[in-house]
Image (tube, grey):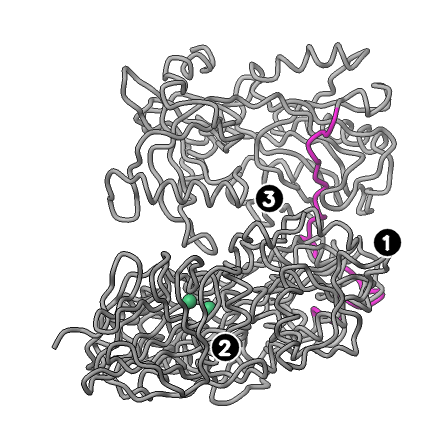
Amino acid sequence: MKAFADLYAALDETTKTNEKIAAMSSYFRSAPPADISWAVHFLIGRRPKRLIPTRELAAWAIEEAKIPEWLFGESYQAVGDLAETIALLLPPAQATSSRPLHEWVEQRLLPMRDWDDRARRESMIEAWREMSDRQRFAWNKLITGEFRVGVSQNLVVRALAEASGVDANVLAHRLMGDWQPTPDFATEILAKTTGDADVSRPYPFCLAYPLEGTVEELGPVHEWQIEWKWDGIRSQLIRRQWRTFLWSRGEELITDRFPELAAAGALLPEGTVLDGEVLPWKDGAPLPFTEMQRRIGRKELGSKILAEVPVVLMAFDLLEHGGQDARERSLEWRRAELERIVAAAGPESHLLASPLVEGASWEELQRTREEARSRGVEGFMLKRRGSPYRVGRRRGDWWKWKINPYSVDAVLIYAQPGSGRRASLFTDYTFGVWDQGELVPFAKAYSGLTDDEIRQVDAFVRNHTIEKFGPVRRLKPELVFELAFEAIQRSSRHRSGIAVRFPRIARWRTDKKAEDADTIETVRALLPPG
Amino acid sequence: MDNLLERQPDGLYCAAGGFYIDPWNPVERAVITHAHADHLCPSSKRYLCTRAGEALLRARIGSEGLIEAVDYGASVTFDGVRVSLHPAGHIRGSAQIRLEYRGEIWVVSGDYKLDADSTCAPFDPVPCHTFVTESTFGLPIFRWLEPTEALAAINAWWRGNRQAGKASVLFAYPLGKAQRVLAGVDSSIGPIYTHGAVETFNRLYRDAGIALAATQYARSAPPKTDWTGALILAPPMAKTAPWLRRFGDFSTGLASGWMRIRGTRRRRSIDRGFVLSDHADWPALLTAIRSSGARRVWVTHGYRAQLARWLEESGLEAHAIDTQYEGERDDAELPSDEAEP
Ligand SMILES: [Zn+2]
Ligand SMILES: [Zn+2]
């Protein structure tokens, strides 16, 4: 546990990619396989669910630290993170533990689910007493289900590759799917050769960067394959050994949620993996994404909702063909085979091949792109002809060329403290626009400001509170921000009558006064017709 | 009986003796605990401080003002109030101020710490009826490791950077903290350079015979100096200065008690935080208060309300006193005369 807690601290301390990789690979080189499996499991974000309610954890820490509850509260205020507050204020460790990570996890963490409160409490206190501050912090994070590290799966793969000498693409594939963190797993992923046997295992998704600079810088237009950028659930549909699996990009197996696609799998040749977007689709066009959310929200999928919100897989790539990894083949080859497979599945299959967009010049495409909003897409995907299917987010071969997001100038009207490391600052904001001389709440946004701006806004909040409701502060309407968002639609659930998707702060309009912010009429004008 | 001290608009005032302790505005007579800016306001007429702190005080206030310096433990009497200064262990020359009048004894701690520090005299508990304590780190989350561990961490970071071909820029409060680092780091790792604000105080420490690692003033280093492997000591506010660019590839560190908290470490956007403070941590505050034997405590600085409440609940009479003392600032502005262009 000590080595793992040190790794956690080292990853937390640096923002530099190389240093993160170095810290992980040195851990992978020295840790036993049983620990490596768990470390990989946690590092790639497969954290356990919260095992103990924070209220109880706090109560036990208060008792153990022999301090009154108010003083714990004050300490929490200063730290802004529960796991850390507890780690810092408990008395120094009485013993040091050399118990390895897998023992902690397998003997203390996993069984905790089945223990009663007394046993949980005893286990926690015993753990705290033999742990350094660092170990306590990592342990508390695991127990509260909040263990997060700032590393992507890609970085973990690179560190494993560095430590083991196994090719990064092979490793990335081995880390996909539904593996269990057993000692064998670590031995297997780090082995030079293994039969990669798991039939359900998806491939790592290739992800696109937003286009930087101008589209002309990409060179001649004929070197690019152009598709619409669909806004759905990015997924892989897998057909192997007469079984069908649908994996989302969040690495969830979602086959059960989409019976249409589970059935479509049977129409695919043996040994096929398609990459695409699951879209709510009716009468030849996508439905708003909120319809999809409505469907996902259902516990039971009745025939009514299936009829109201049917889905398709808008397939745009072929990753496995005839049981062979096809990712190194050229984009044209994969596209041609994809079209054949989709055509063979037939028009009733709920499978579509993402249509290609033609354009003789970038200029012409730029005009076509203006149709994106009316087509219910987010813009274009640009893919370099001749390129292989890459692992993870890479610059160069795939770009998203999105339509410019909508933007509105709105006034900051409510604020409340953030969570995690931002719990000591007001970072969650609600913005309003004018409606007949009154500010109506219009969107919430959490991101987009620099740390410096966050501090300034925080100071503003503390000095301009008009009213408090629990953690929420109502503020003097003074600060104006430009909000950007991706989509807008009518909503009866919002006071403004409008819901926006992915709102974020584009910039702080220090040049504007509250009176200069937009009105609800201006915002309504952005709504799609209907 | 009236209080021996009262909180006046200009600072803590002793009416019987006609003097202030660490006033934040210019006054007739000021008794000074130590030379940090929040405890020492220039332009008063007369100052009383320790002999060890005199040169630092003079450097801070300029040529105006009369300074009377006394040895630790020696006493002076103002209108029947006996005043003596006792080591506070905070920085060189720092003192707790003991006042005695008609059998009533008060001690004003100024800033203090109980940890070992070779650059100043160690904290000396002084029995009293009323103890005026600081509370910069007055919460139980603040608990320091041995200072030797913090220094070892600084050495390891410096050595690692040297191996990686980088310079190490360490931000530390220029008076006290910087010298404590210089007295404790392993100077065999590489050359040490300083920002002007640090160098000014280094000179005064060395003049007083305190052993510090050898340093060079970074601005007078010859052009094309190779900074790889060097340690550069600078005040925290130099963090955003263009001054830093000359060092090429470097890692940044900050030595401060606030580095105990992950959120403050991250918000400062520095590479490494080292928990090293010249203030008492929570256990040390409680130890110092207990060993003063005082039944009544006044609490100044940051967490005064919290510490006072804790003391009240432990059976002492405690009051939170609102002052302008700021405690350990790792984001303090540099006075303009100390800023590097
Ligand atoms: Zn001080
Ligand atoms: Zn102070």
Q: Viewer-nearest of labels 2 and 1?
A: 2
Q: How many marks?
A: 3
The image quadrant that residue A390 belongs to is top right
In the rendering, at what x and y percent does residue B231 appear? 74, 66
In the rendering, at what x and y percent does residue A373 appear? 57, 17
Residue A203 included in the magenta stretch of the image: yes
> Does label 3 lie on the same chain as label 2?
no
Describe residue B275's horizontal placement relative to residue A414 as left or right: right
Task: Classify A24 as above or below A280.
Answer: below
In the rendering, at what x and y percent does residue A165 appear? 85, 64
In the rendering, at what x and y percent does residue A338 appear? 77, 31
Q: CA distance from mark 3 to mark 1?
A: 57 Å
Q: Chain of mark 3?
A: A
Q: Amino acid at mark 2?
A: Gly
* Mark 1 close to ligand 1, CB under 8 Å: no
Q: Nearer the viewer, residue A363 or A77?
A: A77
Any mark on residue B223, and which? 1
Describe residue B121's horizontal placement relative to residue A176 as left or right: left
Mark 2, Cα crowd under 10 Å, few <14 / some 14-19 / many 20+, is many
Q: Nearer the viewer, residue B56 or A104?
A: B56
Q: Badge 2 is on which residue?
A: B93
Q: CA distance from mark 2 to mark 3?
A: 66 Å
Tag 3, which secondary structure? strand
Q: Which residues are magenta?
A: A185-213
Quadrant where the C terminus of chain A sits is top left
Any mark on residue A248, and which? 3
Residue A436 included in the magenta stretch of the image: no
